């Protein structure tokens, strides 16, 4: 166990794509954590999906040994964090385990929306912030302007900002020294009762739950009996260790150290992120303050492709929740798709990531319904209910008033794109609250708009409209009145509950038309005509038709009277009618995916 005076715990926070993972690679390289032959880009991004998309989804920790200029060796515990707004919960957990943060700013982009919100999050936790200007090797880098923004918009000392290039490794040695000098050491003692904060965990099929924790007071060693304060469950520690890309076994973890424990925990629900681990024999007086409870904003139902795989899907979701504490789910069922789960996500990117992880890591073939937000409904009986599932919609006659969640969106953009971005936000029912000129080239737009409008294609449109220069951050600010309607999709005159959607009534026609068009292309043709209809109540507002596959019954008529041909065609017509009466349409998975992806596909 190390003396806390020689430990530094820090995280890297920044806006998306400002070079956090690249800088973390240089730290790992300089500290020789892995052999140079095994070094690769995005070392801490261990999921295939992270590498493919070039984004960080999970916060990852690694312990670096660094010999400073004073001749002493320090243990630097680094946590690399995501930058996308959907994963800000991951950032808050990483911040809770640290005493300092490197606030990374791209020298070509300057201060952006997520830079500000991450800095405020770090300040709330009283972290020591070191501003770092990255990508100084780029031809478009403007260091003087970035320093001015650090002072003007962040209120930090521009002279204390360090210049680095994560790609080339320039300035990394100076950054190591700054971490040792400027970030405070942990202020806890080994004599204190054990208090360790669980900030993450993952499941190993052979060893059970591997708990990631930061020790505040006391120490933890193999053979010790521990208690999880939230669940009250007790276990005996089998192994302790640190993160050195792989899990490196140690003799114990002392105050201030970041590492993992294995205690033969097989009951997945016992371990909760934000819980406190303490000594069963000498427990701490109180638990550490955990993390604020995350509130999901996007909801969708997940069903197994084969009903027999329901238990496997349930097990997969349990294990995924260990690794992704912001995932919320409960049991659900559908007439069309059988038993499944209603899940809550932090945003649409989070939904896509969960879907891909279930398919790749847990080998699940799944179907997802169209995403929705949570509405607040006041009933004529005086009762107020919250609904996010179209199946729970009470019907217009029982509704006195409906409200939908609104967000405050912060957009930072170059002046040239103000007009286009204003038009985009107004089209999404946004209201301009303020327009602040940050300098002669950039402006901050604050809009209030419905969350449902931002769900599908807003982020993609924002980036394409501003050629990638605009940045976006948002927070949910409450509920506002809305005109809500339930859009039913009928296939062959039968409503399909899994395709139903809750929509803003004036936009219902457009949504219904697009959904019917997409389904027309996704459902295979049958021997009979299939109508696809969008309806609000009993009123049909959109329709498409899938024409039947027609057998050529006249092929054998190589001549003869026209009445014989007509007789055969009439006979076929009667057969088609009978077939339609008993014919049932099987919906392929592509039909549900078509509705889920309809918006983004139509916008491209």
Image (cartoon, rainbow, N blue to C red):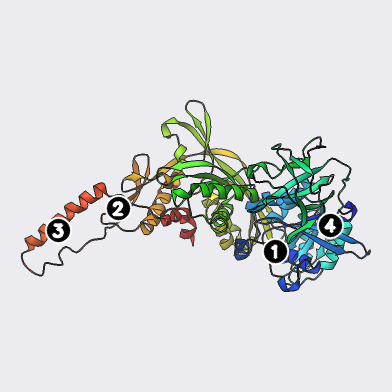
Mark 2 and mark 3: Cα distance apart in space: 20 Å
For label 1, the residue is: 109
Mark 2 and mark 4: Cα distance apart in space: 67 Å
Q: Earlier in the sequence, mark 2 or mark 4?
A: 4
Instruction: Tell me if residue 433 can be seen.
Output: no
Q: Are marks 1 and 2 in contact (CB under 8 Å)?
A: no
Q: Which of label 1 and label 2 is nearer to you?
A: 2
Q: Earlier in the sequence, mark 4 or mark 1?
A: 1
Residue 291 figure quarter: top right
Regarding mark 4 in the picture, which secondary structure is present there? Answer: loop
Q: Foreground: 429 or 98? A: 98
Q: Which of label 3 and label 4 is nearer to you?
A: 3
For label 2, the residue is: 530
Q: Foreground: 118 or 553? A: 553
For label 3, the residue is: 569
Q: Earlier in the sequence, mark 1 or mark 2?
A: 1
Q: Is residue 594 left or right of residue 122?
A: left
Q: Position of residue 265 (x, y in %)?
A: 68, 46
Q: Foreground: 431 or 310? A: 310
């Amino acid at each position: 166990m190390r003396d806390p005076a020689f430990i530094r715990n820090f995280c890297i926070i920044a806006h998306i794509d400002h070079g956090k993972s690249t800088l973390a690679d240089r730290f790992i390289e300089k500290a020789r954590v892995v052999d140079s032959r095994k070094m690769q880009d995005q070392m801490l991004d261990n999921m295939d999906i992270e590498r493919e998309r070039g984004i960080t989804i999970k916060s990852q920790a690694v312990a670096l040994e660094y010999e400073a200029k004073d001749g002493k060796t320090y243990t630097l515990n680094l946590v690399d964090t995501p930058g996308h707004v959907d994963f800000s919960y991951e950032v808050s957990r990483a911040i809770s385990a640290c005493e300092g943060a490197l606030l990374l700013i791209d020298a070509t982009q300057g201060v952006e929306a997520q830079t500000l919100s991450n800095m405020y999050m770090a300040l709330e936790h009283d972290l020591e912030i070191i501003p770092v200007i990255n990508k100084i090797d780029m031809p478009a880098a403007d260091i003087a302007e970035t320093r001015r923004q650090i002072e003007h918009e962040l209120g930090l000392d521009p002279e204390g900002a360090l210049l680095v290039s994560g790609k080339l490794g320039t300035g990394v040695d100076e950054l190591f020294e700054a971490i040792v000098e400027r970030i405070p050491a942990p202020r806890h003692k080994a004599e204190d009762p054990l208090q360790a904060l669980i900030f993450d965990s993952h499941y190993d099929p052979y060893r059970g739950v591997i708990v990631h924790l930061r020790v505040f007071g006391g120490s933890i060693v193999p053979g010790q009996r521990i208690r999880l304060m939230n669940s009250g469950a007790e276990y005996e520690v089998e192994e302790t260790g640190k993160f050195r890309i792989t899990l490196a076994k140690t003799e114990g973890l002392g105050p201030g150290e970041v590492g993992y424990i294995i205690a033969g925990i097989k009951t997945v629900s016992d371990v909760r992120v934000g819980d406190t681990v303490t000594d069963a024999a000498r427990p701490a007086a109180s638990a550490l303050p955990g993390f604020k409870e995350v509130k999901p904003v996007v909801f969708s139902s997940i069903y197994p492709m084969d009903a027999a795989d329901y238990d496997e899907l349930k097990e997969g979701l349990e294990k995924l929740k260990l690794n992704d504490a912001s995932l919320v789910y409960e049991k659900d069922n559908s007439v069309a798709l059988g038993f499944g789960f209603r899940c809550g996500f932090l945003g649409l990117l989070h939904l896509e990531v969960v879907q891909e992880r279930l398919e790749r890591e847990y080998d699940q073939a799944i179907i997802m319904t169209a995403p929705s937000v949570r509405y607040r409904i006041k009933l004529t009986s005086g009762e107020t209910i919250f609904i996010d599932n179209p199946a729970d919609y009470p019907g217009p006659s029982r509704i006195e008033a409906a409200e939908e969640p609104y967000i405050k969106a912060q957009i930072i953009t170059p002046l040239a794109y103000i007009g286009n971005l204003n038009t985009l936000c107004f089209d999404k029912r946004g209201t301009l609250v303020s327009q602040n000129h940050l300098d002669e080239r950039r402006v901050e737009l604050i809009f209030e708009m419905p969350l449902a409008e931002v769900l599908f294609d807003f982020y993609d449109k924002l980036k394409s409209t501003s050629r990638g220069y605009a940045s976006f951050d948002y927070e949910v600010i409450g509920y506002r009145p809305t005109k809500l309607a339930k859009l039913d999709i009928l296939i062959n005159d039968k409503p399909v509950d899994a395709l139903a959607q809750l929509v803003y009534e004036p936009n219902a026609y457009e949504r219904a038309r697009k959904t019917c068009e997409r389904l027309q292309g996704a459902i295979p043709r049958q021997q009979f005509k299939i109508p696809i209809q969008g309806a609000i109540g009993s009123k049909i507002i959109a329709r498409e038709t899938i024409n039947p596959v027609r057998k050529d019954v006249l092929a054998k008529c190589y001549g003869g009277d026209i009445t014989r041909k007509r007789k055969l065609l009439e006979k076929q017509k009667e057969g088609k009618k009978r077939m339609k009466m008993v014919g049932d349409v099987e919906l392929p998975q592509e039909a549900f995916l078509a509705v889920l992806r309809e918006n983004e596909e139509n916008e491209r």
